[in-house]
């Protein structure tokens, strides 16, 4: 290293100073090149900038208009949908009320006297009145129900008079008669004053209500007499489960069309029914054409997938603002449901109308841009001159300042490097010193090294302690595993001198210790107790609870109690001191060895599996009692199974059917039964190992999440004594 003017020059100092000089030189060259390029290409830059800014204005304008449309159009659509819903809710309510009254009249007709119903009277035209209509060839005087329903004439007239939306209301019967209320009696008569035949059962409102067996709205239909466009709401009337008639209310389109016609400028609103047909709209043609139900098309089948998707969505919920192209023109569309009838309101705006503000903004920008270009050219020359002067000064001052600053910065770093090297050689910790107090990143670096040195020493001490503690815990867990295994019968065969039966069991805990347990023990020479249980939870708490439960079950069973009494006693004992509110499911069976009678009780455990000598393994769906430890004072029921010679019993915990593979699929009882029946004549040991092999193959690499415990008993029958 060399010293220049008392400053060490070399290493990091040299590199830093050269880097500063190079950067300043490159900056000067770049500035000169940019200045020359700017002078030659100014017009092109201005032109390109103008295009980019115009695009930005256009995009911003479109985005702003989209936000405005999204806010206003969505709100307006939801408001109109609510208005329409209110209108149709009234119609639905009146229809349901008329349906209820009609069914009530017919169900209680024995307490009523039939009333006469007259034919249409031209003199009552213009006034709400009730009269009878009927199909050609039908004798209305022989109608079974018409006279009783005539009691509804007054309520129906009141309903018609009190609502401007109702054009008429009626009750059509399955015998071809119709009780009608409206103010157009004259239209139902011929010139000679005879009633015009009315095909009640052929009208869309009647057919639709019968087929749907529920509230039904027609599309747009024509009145059978006046030809007026209507929508009809109808509902079936039933008696003893059979449809005997249909109530209907004609809705005047003009009464629910006001909110459709009252569209904002440029916005069109349409009402679409659940069949995709246009019910109401401001125009006869266009995107949505209003037509009769028999002629109207389902817009979802128009071939326009975007339009079909919007309508389908709108029938179930708000669509939000969407852009849909129809006939080469793009439209903003928003749909909102009318829940009462399952219809939707669609608002439509021509997208071209929203682009007018964009054109105005672009025109204003062109004028501003021309003025800005002239100003830029004038000021650019001044900026270039000032920039050259400042660049020269920066080059000179920067190099001198860099030499001084770099030397001051590198000196403590060099000293720090020496101290760290020395610490590495001696093993002493790195400590903070006054020479590192520079009030900058060097001081922070020194503090970090000092702190890191302390933490490393502390980390080494902690790792040593943690390793020792981990080894101690591992040793204790291994001991707990052995103790738990020793608590369960694990020598097989357990009763080599008893030829009447063979029994085998296994338990594989999900953790080092588990909550499952099994047990079998001779209560006396003629009785064998068999237990399998599953404690709530896993790990050491479950293992401790398991040990206590096992001891209680065995102790009470050895007293000669029946299985149900054993479970009741164990439940009472556990509930006395169960502050952790743990519980255990238990299946307990006591086998009468000479007879093969197995007396059992189940406290919330899995169904046992039974195989008769000539049959397959099948679930034995016994009645479950409540879990042990859940509630004191519980009672448990017993049941008996007669085991013939050669019969087998398989009991298990839920870890078998609920074993799960990597796809979260359960092993299930069907696979468990299939595994048992695969070698159904094998010994209990082979059967359990075969089930475990099937579970392992199914689970694969997935982690075992629950204890897996199984017990299998094979009953061979009483053994005759040898002479």
Image (tube, rainbow, N blue to C red):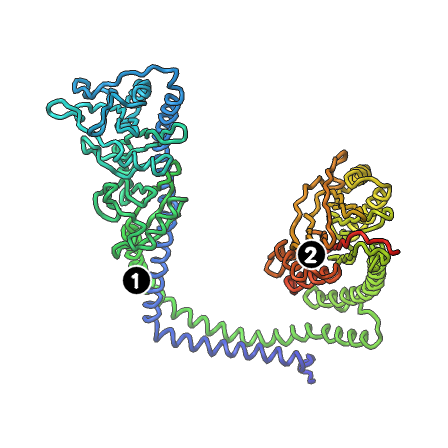
**Residue 165 visible from this viewpoint:** no
Q: Which sits earlier in the primary sequence, circle 2 or circle 1?
A: 1
Foreground mark, 2 or 1, reads 2
Name the residue rendered at 63%, 53% in the picture. 669
Residue 242 in picture, x, y percent from top left: 38, 31
Compared with residue 380, is residue 621 higher up or lower down, i.e. above or below?
above
Disc 2 crowd, CA 10 A, few/some/many (<14, 14-19, 20+): some
Residue situated in front as seen by the camera: 17 or 458 = 458
- Asked whether, in this view, residue 127 is left or right of residue 389, the answer is left
Residue 108 in picture, x, y percent from top left: 40, 19
Q: Quadrant of the C terminus?
A: bottom right
Q: Residue furthest bottom?
A: 2
**Residue 286 visible from this viewpoint:** yes
Q: Whole-Å distance between the Cαs marked 2 and 1?
A: 75 Å
Element type at mark 1 = helix
- Asked whether, in this view, residue 50 is left or right of residue 132, the answer is right
Count the marks: how many?
Answer: 2
Element type at mark 2 = loop
Residue situated in front as seen by the camera: 208 or 463 = 208
Residue 380 in picture, x, y percent from top left: 38, 69
- Asked whether, in this view, residue 52 is left or right of residue 595, the answer is left
Q: In terms of image quadrants, where is residue 664?
A: bottom right
Name the residue rendered at 80%, 69% in the picture. 430
Residue situated in front as seen by the camera: 558 or 577 = 558
The residue that mark 2 highlights is: 705
Q: Residue furthest right?
A: 723
Q: Residue furthest left?
A: 192
Name the residue rendered at 72%, 56% in the picture. 708
Disc 1 crowd, CA 10 A, few/some/many (<14, 14-19, 20+): few
Name the residue rendered at 74%, 65% in the picture. 447
Compared with residue 504, is residue 122 higher up or lower down, i.e. above or below?
above
Q: Which mark is residue 370?
A: 1
């Amino acid at each position: 290293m060399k010293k220049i003017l008392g400053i060490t020059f070399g290493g990091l100092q040299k590199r830093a100073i050269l880097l500063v000089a190079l950067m300043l030189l490159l900056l000067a060259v770049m500035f000169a090149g940019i200045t020359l390029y700017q002078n030659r290409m100014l017009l092109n830059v201005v032109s390109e900038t103008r295009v980019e800014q115009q695009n930005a204005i256009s995009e911003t304008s479109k985005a702003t208009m989209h936000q405005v449309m999204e806010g206003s159009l969505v709100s307006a659509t939801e408001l109109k949908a609510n208005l329409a819903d209110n209108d149709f809710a009234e119609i639905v309510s009146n229809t349901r009320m008329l349906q209820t009254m009609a069914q009530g009249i017919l169900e209680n007709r024995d307490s009523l006297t039939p009333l006469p119903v007259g034919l249409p009277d031209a003199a009552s035209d213009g006034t709400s009145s009730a009269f009878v209509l009927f199909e050609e060839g039908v004798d209305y005087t022989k109608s079974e129900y018409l006279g009783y329903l005539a009691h509804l004439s007054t309520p129906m007239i009141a309903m018609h008079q009190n609502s401007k939306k109702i054009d008429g209301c009626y009750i059509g019967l399955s015998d071809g008669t119709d009780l009608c209320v409206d103010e157009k009696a004259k239209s139902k008569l011929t010139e000679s004053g005879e009633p015009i035949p009315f095909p009640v059962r052929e009208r869309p409102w009647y057919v639709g209500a019968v087929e749907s067996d529920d509230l039904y709205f027609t599309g747009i239909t024509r009145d059978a007499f006046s030809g007026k466009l209507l929508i009809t709401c109808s509902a079936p009337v039933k008696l003893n489960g059979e449809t005997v008639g249909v109530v209907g209310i004609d809705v005047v389109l003009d009464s629910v069309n006001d909110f459709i016609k009252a569209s904002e400028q440029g916005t069109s609103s349409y009402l679409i029914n659940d069949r995709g047909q246009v019910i109401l709209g401001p125009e006869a043609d266009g995107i949505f054409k209003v037509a009769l139900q028999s002629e109207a098309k389902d817009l979802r089948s128009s071939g326009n997938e975007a339009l079909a998707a919007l309508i389908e969505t709108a029938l179930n919920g708000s669509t939000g603002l969407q852009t849909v192209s129809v006939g080469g023109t793009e439209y903003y569309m928003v749909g909102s449901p009318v829940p009462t009838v399952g219809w939707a309101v669609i608002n439509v705006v021509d997208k071209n109308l929203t682009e007018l503000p964009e054109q105005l903004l672009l025109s204003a920008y062109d004028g501003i841009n021309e003025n800005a270009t002239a100003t830029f050219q004038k000021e650019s020359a001044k900026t270039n001159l000032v920039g050259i002067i400042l660049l020269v000064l920066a080059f000179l001052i920067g190099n001198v300042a860099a030499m001084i600053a770099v030397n001051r910065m590198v000196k403590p770093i060099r000293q720090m490097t020496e101290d760290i090297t020395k610490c590495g050689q001696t093993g002493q910790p790195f400590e903070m010193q006054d020479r590192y107090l520079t009030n900058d990143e060097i001081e922070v670096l020194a503090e970090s090294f000092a702190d890191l040195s302390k933490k490393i020493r502390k980390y080494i001490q902690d790792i040593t302690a943690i390793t020792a503690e981990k080894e101690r815990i591992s040793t204790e867990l291994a001991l707990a595993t052995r103790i738990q295994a020793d608590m369960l019968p694990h020598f097989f065969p357990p009763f080599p001198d008893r030829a009447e039966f063979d029994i085998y069991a296994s338990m594989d805990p999900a953790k080092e210790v588990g909550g499952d347990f099994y047990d079998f023990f001779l209560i006396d020479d003629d009785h064998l107790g068999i237990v399998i249980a599953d404690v709530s939870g896993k790990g050491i708490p479950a293992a401790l609870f398991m040990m206590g439960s096992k001891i209680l079950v065995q102790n009470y069973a050895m007293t000669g109690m029946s299985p149900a009494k054993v479970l009741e006693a164990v439940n009472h004992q556990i509930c006395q001191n169960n502050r952790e509110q743990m519980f255990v499911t238990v299946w307990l069976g006591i086998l009468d060895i000479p007879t093969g009678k197995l007396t059992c009780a189940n406290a919330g455990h899995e169904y046992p599996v039974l195989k008769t000598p000539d049959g397959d393994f099948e679930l034995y769906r016994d009645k479950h009692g409540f879990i042990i430890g859940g509630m004191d004072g519980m009672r448990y029921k017993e049941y008996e199974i007669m085991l013939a010679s050669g019969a087998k019993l398989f009991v298990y915990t839920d870890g078998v059917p609920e074993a799960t593979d990597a796809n979260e699929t359960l092993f299930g009882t069907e696979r468990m039964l299939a595994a048992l029946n695969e070698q159904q004549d094998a010994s209990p040991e082979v059967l359990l190992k075969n089930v475990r092999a099937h579970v392992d193959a199914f689970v694969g690499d997935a982690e075992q999440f629950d204890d897996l415990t199984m017990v299998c008993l094979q009953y061979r029958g009483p053994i005759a004594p040898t002479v």
